Image (spheres, coloured by chain):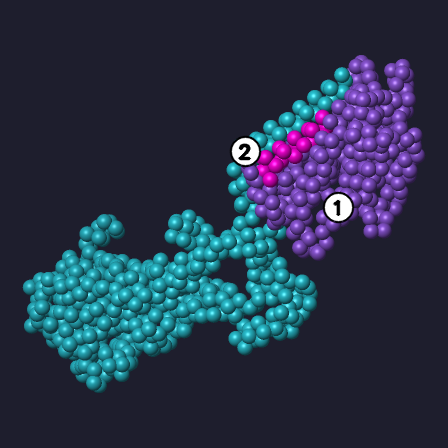
Chain colours: A purple, B cyan
């Protein structure tokens, strides 16, 4: 009886939006990886389907079990995840100059993606438990440490984009936690002062990506190539797109990384403005529902958790699409639910599962 | 309430992205679409086969034959070192050299790179059969231009070169590209527009590495038109061999039509050297050679004519009515003028001479006095009427105009007075007078055809369509004077003491005039101009040997051999 009521409380719209995005993702991935599948005989699609199965199980489990239970174990998962991040630095696989992956049998796994979720979980618990604490600078030390450890480990891999995505997530959670505005001013000021310092710590390739972002014609065959080809791909889609499997930038291999970070370019090229804008509308619905669940949660834990997870998804969408259009620097942030990448798909489905879980336990619904 | 702000922020950002998408796809979209098309479509040129140049009987003077080249298709090669080794064993070129050639020529993954040229057909066949064992290896049948007569025909057909980048701007509207061969001299140059043909091309779709994906469009190349020239290959070769590498020229023309049956400049050059990438040294030798093989002596070299010019002087005297065929001068072997002694070439003296005798013996003393009586203006005017001092307008590039001096010319150009001694010199074809063998040929034809002037030319037909030739233009000339000159010319060859005795051939009565022109240091230029048969002239011949000696011994001897050859051919 109780179980049925629980399922009735599920946000149906959010659910179907997610299902739709996942299906769109599979269709686009099929087209984006078709040439490679022809050439090598191995398809990204089958791997992605395997991860999708795993992700759906995880999402179902997260929905069924009360999220308070997960919050209880938050420190445990967080600690385990930090250990995995440390393990990556010691024994991880290196691809393209960065050590980001852990291999476990046939599965290759990226702990930094899951670290986003476990950090939000711990942060939600700590901020929820200390919701009445006086808003002093000292009070910010524990959250800073909670975010700082995974960020530092991820920066070390190096993976600048993933590390930086923690900042808006933390910011939105602190905002909901009601951090007073004078402290925001201080934070913003010190961030501005720290920026030049951060430039000195960047790797050369990261700097060149940022410089190319400012001026894409700086190096059209090198760092600027991807962005240029991506813009050509998106732009050439016009209103209706060139059709599924008919994008020349995609099928003739002009677009690098088109199955992962630049999959939105393929959507733009083959599905046109209607397709690309449609996908953005779906994301808007997802965010809208996510924030509504956060607002209607019966306790601060649910609010904070849903806020953090929805912000994470939203930031990924905006940075990824902006990067595709050359409006954001090229940082390796995949598109939620669509980009190829098992760990990230799993993390997204887990996030959606947890948001739905919070929604199912809203007052008046549960 | 705080959450509502976060949501608004995100929705605003998403709306911004939708707006950006609109700008990218709907407003700038078409230009991005063009860039995408440019990304994927490449054009591979298909050069047209050049038209052949044929002699008057259809024998090839220049044609494209298939040369079997070994090329590497970069995108198909799986194992380069193994390929070099295998290829090296087959064709006997060290692998390192093959590799070096490949690196230098490499252009794109889908463009074949030629690493070895002109294979034996049997070897090419063997390679082609075993192609599957070596992926990436291609045997390319490439058209290469062949010139069967070699150096003998160089001056006529000219040579090819790659399009000059500066000239390309002008040639581009006519379908030339930077990789095209274009005629640089001779017939190859003059009739290049017909010979060239129209290049074609294949439009292909390529991927991001420039590898060919599929063919989109094809414009087949159109072969150039064949050019038939008036030259007789056998006669041309024979004439060239007669000169035997000496500097000079031979011209043989069919009189009624103006067709040049042989057009030789010696020493010649082998046009094949210019299209063979392995014969660069030969080209450099041609350029450095003191004998200047690339210089067309038949039309471009202006030299003093010596005694062959006496035909002009003779005619000038007869039409001036100041002298006649009965006018007689005594030749004691020399002639005194203004305190200077002018010699006759025969120092013992010819004795009393009439015009016909003086032509036969080429008596200088006779013509000094004859010329002085006519005056320089009269000789110069006649010379111009005979075609000297202006190009003959033969369709053979690089023609010189020569120079006909007269008192006015001297005043204008040298700012000096004309001396009587110069008139004497002009009368025997010396002094400042400069002519080309082609002009001498034109003069000979005019005399032989009794005042009709054919237009010398080389083009006979374009792609089997004969080129219309205007009949010889009839000039208003004194027939009796020309007849007298012709009897003089007949005596040159036929009479016992004629200077052109060596040109005599039993069975082919010929007429002519020898010339021995002093020119700076070294031996004289040897000239002979003539026609045959004497009674009904059909061919005119000019032989010129630069610093070759006397006209009577050298040039007339060669002319005799030419007449013999013409007799055998049945002209």
Task: Tell me the element at label 2.
Answer: helix
Q: Are marks 2 and 1 on the same chain?
A: no
Overall secondary structure of the magenta stretch?
helix
Q: Residue at x 88, y 18 (%)?
A: A131
Q: Which residues are magenta?
A: A271-288
**For this view, does B536 lie left or right of residue B242?**
left
User: Would residue B88 be counted in the magenta stretch?
Assistant: no
**For this view, does B159 lie left or right of residue B14?**
left
User: Which label lies toward us, 2 or 1?
Assistant: 1
Crowding at dot 1, Cα within 10 Å, few <14 / some 14-19 / many 20+, comes out as many
Residue at the limit of the structure toward the bottom, as seen here: B506
Q: Position of residue A181 (x, y in %)?
A: 79, 14
Above/below status of B571 relative to A151: below
Placement of the N terminus of chain B among the 4 image quadrants = top right
User: Would residue A282 be counted in the magenta stretch?
Assistant: yes
Placement of the C terminus of chain B among the 4 image quadrants = bottom left
Q: Which mark is residue A136?
A: none
Identify residue for label 2: B26
Task: Tell me the element at label 1.
Answer: helix
* In-front residue for pair B444/B61: B61
Q: Which mark is residue A48?
A: 1
- What number of labels is visible? 2
Label 2 marks a residue whose chain is: B
* In-front residue for pair A207/B30: B30
Above/below status of A342 relative to A297: below
Residue A193 in which image quadrant = top right
* In-front residue for pair B542/B373: B542
């Amino acid at each position: 009886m109780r179980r049925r009521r629980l399922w009735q409380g599920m946000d149906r719209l959010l659910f179907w939006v997610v299902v739709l995005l996942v299906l769109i993702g599979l269709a686009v991935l099929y087209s984006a990886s078709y040439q490679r599948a022809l050439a090598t005989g191995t398809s990204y699609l089958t791997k992605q389907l395997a991860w999708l199965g795993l992700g759906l199980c995880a999402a179902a489990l997260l929905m069924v079990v009360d999220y308070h239970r997960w919050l209880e174990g938050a420190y445990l998962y967080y600690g385990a995840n930090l250990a995995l991040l440390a393990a990556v630095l010691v024994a991880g696989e290196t691809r393209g100059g960065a050590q980001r992956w852990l291999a476990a049998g046939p599965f290759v796994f990226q702990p930094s993606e899951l670290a986003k979720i476990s950090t939000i979980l711990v942060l939600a618990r700590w901020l929820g438990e200390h919701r009445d604490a006086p808003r002093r600078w000292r009070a910010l030390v524990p959250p800073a440490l909670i975010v700082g450890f995974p960020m530092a480990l991820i920066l070390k891999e190096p993976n600048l984009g993933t590390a930086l995505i923690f900042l808006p997530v933390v910011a939105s959670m602190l905002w909901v936690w009601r951090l007073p505005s004078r402290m925001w001013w201080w934070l913003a000021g010190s961030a501005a002062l720290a920026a030049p310092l951060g430039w000195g710590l960047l790797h050369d390739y990261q700097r060149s990506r940022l410089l190319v972002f400012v001026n894409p014609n700086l190096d059209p065959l090198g760092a600027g190539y991807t962005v240029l080809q991506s813009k050509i791909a998106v732009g050439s889609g016009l209103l209706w797109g060139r059709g599924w499997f008919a994008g020349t930038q995609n099928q003739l291999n002009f677009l690098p990384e088109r199955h992962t970070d630049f999959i939105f370019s393929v959507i733009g090229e083959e599905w046109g403005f209607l397709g690309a804008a449609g996908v953005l509308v779906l994301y808007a619905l997802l965010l809208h529902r996510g924030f509504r669940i956060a607002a209607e949660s019966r306790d601060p834990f649910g609010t904070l958790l849903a806020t953090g997870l929805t912000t994470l998804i939203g930031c990924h969408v905006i940075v990824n699409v902006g990067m595709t259009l050359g409006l954001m620097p090229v940082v390796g942030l995949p598109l939620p639910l669509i980009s190829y990448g098992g760990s990230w798909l799993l993390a997204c489905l887990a996030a959606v599962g947890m948001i739905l879980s919070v929604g199912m336990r809203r007052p008046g619904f549960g | 309430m705080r959450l509502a702000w976060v949501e608004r922020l995100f929705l605003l950002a998403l709306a911004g992205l939708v707006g950006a998408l609109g700008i990218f796809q709907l407003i700038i979209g078409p230009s991005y679409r063009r860039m995408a098309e440019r990304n994927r479509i490449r054009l591979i040129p298909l050069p047209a086969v050049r038209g052949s140049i044929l002699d008057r009987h259809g024998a090839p003077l220049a044609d494209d034959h298939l040369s079997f080249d070994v090329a590497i298709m970069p995108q198909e090669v799986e194992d380069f070192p193994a390929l070099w080794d295998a290829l090296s064993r087959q064709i006997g070129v060290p692998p390192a050299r093959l590799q070096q050639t490949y690196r230098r020529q490499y252009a794109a993954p889908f463009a074949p790179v030629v690493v070895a040229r002109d294979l034996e057909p049997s070897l090419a066949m063997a390679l082609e059969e075993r192609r599957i064992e070596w992926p990436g290896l291609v045997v390319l049948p490439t058209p290469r231009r062949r010139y069967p007569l070699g150096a003998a025909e160089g001056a006529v057909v000219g040579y090819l070169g790659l399009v000059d980048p500066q000239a390309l701007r002008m040639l581009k509207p006519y379908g030339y590209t930077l990789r095209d061969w274009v005629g640089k001299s001779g017939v190859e140059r003059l009739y290049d527009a017909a010979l060239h043909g129209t290049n074609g091309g294949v439009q292909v779709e390529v991927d991001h590495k420039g590898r060919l994906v599929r063919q989109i469009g094809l414009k087949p190349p159109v072969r150039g038109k064949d050019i038939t020239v008036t030259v007789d290959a056998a006669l041309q070769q024979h004439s060239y061999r007669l000169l035997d590498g000496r500097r000079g020229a031979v011209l043989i023309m069919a009189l009624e039509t103006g067709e040049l049956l042989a057009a030789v400049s010696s020493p010649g050059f082998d046009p094949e050297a210019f299209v063979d990438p392995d014969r660069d040294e030969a080209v450099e030798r041609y350029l450095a050679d003191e004998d200047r093989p690339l210089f067309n002596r038949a039309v471009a070299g202006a030299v003093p004519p010596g005694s062959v010019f006496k035909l002009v002087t003779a005619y000038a005297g007869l039409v001036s009515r100041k002298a006649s065929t009965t006018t007689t001068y005594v030749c004691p072997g020399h002639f005194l003028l203004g305190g200077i002694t002018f010699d006759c070439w025969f120092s013992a003296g010819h004795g009393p001479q009439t015009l016909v005798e003086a032509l036969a013996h080429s008596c200088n003393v006779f013509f000094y006095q004859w010329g002085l009586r006519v005056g320089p203006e009269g000789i110069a005017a006649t010379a111009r009427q005979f075609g000297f001092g202006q190009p003959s307008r033969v369709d053979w590039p690089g023609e010189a105009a020569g120079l006909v001096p007269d008192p006015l010319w001297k005043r204008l150009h040298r700012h000096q007075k004309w001396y009587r001694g110069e008139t004497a010199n002009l009368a025997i074809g010396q002094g400042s007078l400069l002519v080309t063998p082609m002009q001498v040929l034109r003069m000979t034809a005019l005399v032989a055809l009794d005042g009709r002037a054919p237009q010398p030319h080389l083009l006979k037909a374009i792609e089997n369509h004969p080129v219309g030739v205007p009949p010889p233009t009839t000039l208003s000339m004194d027939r009796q004077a020309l007849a007298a000159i012709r009897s003089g010319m007949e005596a040159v060859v036929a009479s016992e003491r004629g200077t052109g005795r060596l040109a005599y051939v039993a069975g082919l009565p010929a007429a002519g005039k020898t010339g021995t022109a002093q020119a700076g240091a070294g031996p004289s230029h040897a000239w002979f101009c003539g026609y045959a048969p004497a009674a009904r002239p059909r061919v005119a011949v000019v032989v010129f040997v630069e610093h070759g000696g006397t006209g009577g011994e050298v040039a007339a001897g060669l002319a005799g051999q030419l007449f013999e050859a013409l007799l055998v051919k049945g002209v």
